[in-house]
Image: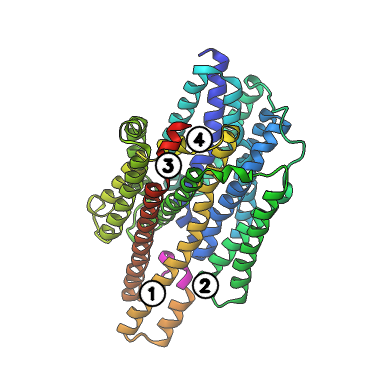
C-alpha cells in the first residue's frame, strides 16, 4: 500500500473501532457507575440502551447523510461529536447527565460508522478494496478484543471515568489523519430528500417500547405508563412500516424484503444477536458483583469468546463453501446455544475455569463460524441494487436486537431475583425491617447491600439465579436462530445469484 492508502485505512479502522469498543468497555464500567450513582438496574440499563437505540435506529440515516453531504465531512463530524459526548460522560455527575452525553456519542457513531466503510469503498478499487475491507474487519475484531482488557486496566487503576477520557486523544488523532489524507466523496445519484420522518418514527417507536419494557421491571406490566409506552411504541412502528412503503426516500426499501432468504437471515440475526447481547450485558455484572472479580479480571475472563471468533473467522468462509451456507448457519448458532446453556448450568461454581470458561469458549466457537457466512449471505440474498442498504439493515437489526434484549432481561433478572429473595425472606422468618430493606433495594440487584450477612448472601445467590435465567433464555433464542436458518435459507437461490 502507498502511504496515503495506509493512513486512510488507519483513520477508518481507529475511527470505527471507537464505536465497536465502546459497548464492551462501558459494560465493564457499569457496576462501578451503578455503585457511585446509587442507581437501579433499570437506570444503568439506559446507559447502554439509549446509545444502542440512537445508533441502531439512525444508522441508515447516517449512511444517507454521508452519501449526500460528503463522507469525509460526515465522518469527521461524527468523530467530533463522539469525542464531545465522551467528555460529557467523563464529567457526568448523575444518570441523567450521563444519558445526555451518551446521546451525543450515539449521534456521532451513527454518522461515522457507516461513513468509514463508504470511505474505504470510494478510496480503494478492485482487489485493493477487498484487501482493505479485510484488513478493516481483522483489525476491528482485534481492537474489539483488546479494548475491553485495556478498559479493565483503566477502570481498576483510574476509575470508570477513564474509559471515556481515552476516547478523546484517539478521536483527535483520527480527525487529524482524516483531514490530511482522506479525500471527499459523495453519491451524486443519492436522493435529494432524506427520510427524516421515517427516522423519527422508527426511533420514537423503538424508544417507547424500550422505555416501557425497562419500566416494567419495577412498575409491573399492569402499569398504565408501561402499557401505554409499549403499545404506543408498537403503533408508531406500524406507522413507520406504512410510511416506508409509501415514500420514495425510504430508509428501508420495501422491495428489499421480497427475498425470502434475506428476510429469514435478518430474523435469525435478531434472535442470535439478541441472545448474544443479553448474555454479554449481564455477564460482567455477575462476575464483578456476585463473584468479586475486578474489571480487568472480568475483561480477561471474557477474552476466550473474542479469541474463538478471531481464530475461526478466517476458516468460516471455507467451511461454508465445503459444507454449505445453510448447514454452517445452522450449526453455528446451535453451538452458541450450547455455550449459553453450559454457562447457565456451570456459572454457580466458584472456579472460573469450571464455571465461566466452558460456556464462554463454546459460545465463541459458535459465533466464530457464524459471523462471516452470515454477512456474506445477507449480501448475496439481496438485490444487487440494494447491497449497501442490505448491509446497513442487517447492522441495524443486530443493534436493535441488543436494544430489545437488554430491556427484556432487565425485567427477567429483576423478576427472578425478587422471587428468589422473597423465598429466602420467608425461610428465615424475616422481620418487617429486613423486608422493608429488601423492598427498598430490590431494583439494585447485585449492587444491593444488606447489614444482615445471611440476607446479603441470599441476595447474591438470588442475583446469580437471575443470570442463570438470562443464560437459558439466550440459549433458547440462539437455538431459534439455528432453526430459522435451517428451514428458511434457500441455498439454491443463493448459488443462482
Whole-Å distance between the Cαs marked 3 and 1? Answer: 59 Å
Residue displayed at 47% across by 48% down = 264
- Structural crowding at the residue carrying mark 3, measured as other residues with C-alpha within 10 Å and reported as few (<14), some (14–19) or many (≥20): some
- Structural crowding at the residue carrying mark 1, measured as other residues with C-alpha within 10 Å and reported as few (<14), some (14–19) or many (≥20): few
Q: Along the horizontal axis of the image, is 435 left or right of 399?
A: left
Quarter location, residue 307:
top left
Q: How many marks?
A: 4
Q: Is residue 94 visible?
A: no
Determine whether the residue tagged by mark 4 lies in a helix, strand or loop: helix
Determine whether the residue tagged by mark 3 lies in a helix, strand or loop: loop
Q: Give the residue pinned by disc 2.
A: 218
Q: Which residues are magenta?
A: 442-451
Does the CB distance between marks 1 and 4 fall below 8 Å? no
Whole-Å distance between the Cαs marked 3 and 2? Answer: 44 Å
Give coordinates of residue 352: x percent, y percent.
Answer: 26, 52
Does the CB distance between marks 3 and 2 fall below 8 Å? no
Q: Give the residue pinned by disc 4.
A: 379
Does the CB distance between marks 4 and 2 fall below 8 Å? no
Q: Is residue 275 above or below residue 137?
A: below
Asked whether 496 or 322 is in front, the reply is 496
Does the CB distance between marks 3 and 4 fall below 8 Å? no
Whole-Å distance between the Cαs marked 3 and 4? Answer: 14 Å
Q: Give the residue pinned by disc 1.
A: 451
Determine whether the residue tagged by mark 2 lies in a helix, strand or loop: helix
Q: Is residue 469 visible?
A: yes
Residue displayed at 58% across by 76% down = 223
Of the numbered discs 3 and 1, the one sitting upstream in the chain is: 1
Whole-Å distance between the Cαs marked 1 and 2? Answer: 23 Å
Asked whether 421 or 470 is in front, the reply is 470
Of the numbered discs 3 and 2, the one sitting upstream in the chain is: 2
Q: Is residue 307 above or below residue 270?
A: above
Colour scheme of the picture: rainbow
Amino acid at each position: 500500500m502507498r502511504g496515503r492508502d495506509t493512513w486512510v485505512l488507519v483513520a477508518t479502522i481507529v475511527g470505527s473501532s471507537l464505536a465497536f469498543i465502546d459497548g464492551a468497555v462501558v459494560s465493564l464500567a457499569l457496576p462501578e457507575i451503578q455503585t457511585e450513582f446509587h442507581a437501579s438496574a433499570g437506570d444503568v440499563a439506559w446507559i447502554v440502551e439509549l446509545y444502542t437505540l440512537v445508533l441502531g435506529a439512525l444508522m441508515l440515516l447516517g449512511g444517507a447523510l454521508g452519501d449526500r453531504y460528503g463522507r469525509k465531512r460526515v465522518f469527521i463530524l461524527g468523530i467530533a461529536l463522539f469525542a464531545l459526548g465522551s467528555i460529557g460522560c467523563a464529567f457526568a455527575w448523575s444518570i441523567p447527565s450521563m444519558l445526555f452525553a451518551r446521546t451525543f456519542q450515539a449521534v456521532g457513531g451513527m454518522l461515522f460508522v457507516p461513513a468509514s466503510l463508504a470511505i474505504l469503498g470510494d478510496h480503494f478499487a478492485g482487489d485493493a478494496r477487498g484487501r482493505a475491507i479485510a484488513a478493516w474487519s481483522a483489525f476491528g475484531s482485534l481492537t474489539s478484543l483488546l479494548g475491553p482488557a485495556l478498559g479493565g486496566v483503566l477502570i481498576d487503576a483510574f476509575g470508570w471515568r477513564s474509559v471515556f477520557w481515552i476516547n478523546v486523544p484517539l478521536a483527535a488523532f483520527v480527525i487529524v489523519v482524516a483531514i490530511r489524507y482522506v479525500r471527499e466523496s459523495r453519491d451524486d445519484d443519492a436522493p435529494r430528500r432524506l427520510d427524516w420522518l421515517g427516522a423519527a418514527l422508527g426511533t420514537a417507536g423503538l424508544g417507547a417500547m424500550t422505555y416501557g419494557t425497562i419500566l416494567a421491571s419495577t412498575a409491573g406490566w399492569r402499569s398504565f405508563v408501561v402499557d401505554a409506552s409499549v403499545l404506543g411504541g408498537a403503533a408508531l412502528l406500524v406507522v413507520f412500516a406504512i410510511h416506508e412503503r409509501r415514500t420514495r426516500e425510504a430508509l428501508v426499501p420495501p422491495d428489499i424484503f421480497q427475498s425470502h432468504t434475506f428476510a429469514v437471515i435478518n430474523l435469525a440475526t435478531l434472535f442470535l444477536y439478541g441472545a448474544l447481547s443479553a448474555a454479554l450485558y449481564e455477564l460482567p455484572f455477575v462476575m464483578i458483583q456476585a463473584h468479586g472479580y475486578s474489571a480487568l479480571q472480568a475483561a480477561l475472563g471474557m477474552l476466550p469468546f473474542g479469541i474463538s471468533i478471531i481464530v475461526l473467522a478466517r476458516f468460516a468462509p471455507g467451511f461454508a463453501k465445503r459444507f454449505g451456507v445453510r448447514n454452517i448457519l445452522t450449526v453455528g448458532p446451535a453451538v452458541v446455544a450450547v455455550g449459553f446453556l453450559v454457562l447457565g448450568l456451570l456459572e454457580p461454581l466458584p472456579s472460573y475455569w469450571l464455571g465461566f470458561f466452558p460456556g464462554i469458549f463454546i459460545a465463541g466457537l459458535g459465533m466464530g463460524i457464524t459471523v462471516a457466512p452470515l454477512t456474506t449471505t445477507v449480501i448475496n440474498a439481496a438485490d444487487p441494487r440494494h447491497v449497501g442498504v442490505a448491509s446497513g439493515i442487517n447492522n441495524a437489526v443486530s443493534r436493535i436486537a441488543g436494544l430489545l434484549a437488554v430491556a427484556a432481561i432487565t425485567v427477567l433478572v429483576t423478576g427472578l431475583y425478587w422471587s428468589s429473595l422473597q423465598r429466602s425472606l420467608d425461610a428465615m422468618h424475616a422481620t418487617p425491617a429486613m423486608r422493608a430493606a429488601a423492598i427498598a433495594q430490590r431494583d439494585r440487584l447485585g449492587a444491593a447491600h444488606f447489614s444482615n450477612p445471611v440476607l446479603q448472601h441470599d441476595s447474591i445467590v438470588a442475583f446469580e439465579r437471575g443470570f442463570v435465567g438470562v443464560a437459558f433464555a439466550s440459549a433458547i433464542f440462539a437455538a431459534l436462530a439455528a432453526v430459522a436458518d435451517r428451514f428458511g435459507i434457500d441455498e439454491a437461490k443463493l448459488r443462482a445469484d
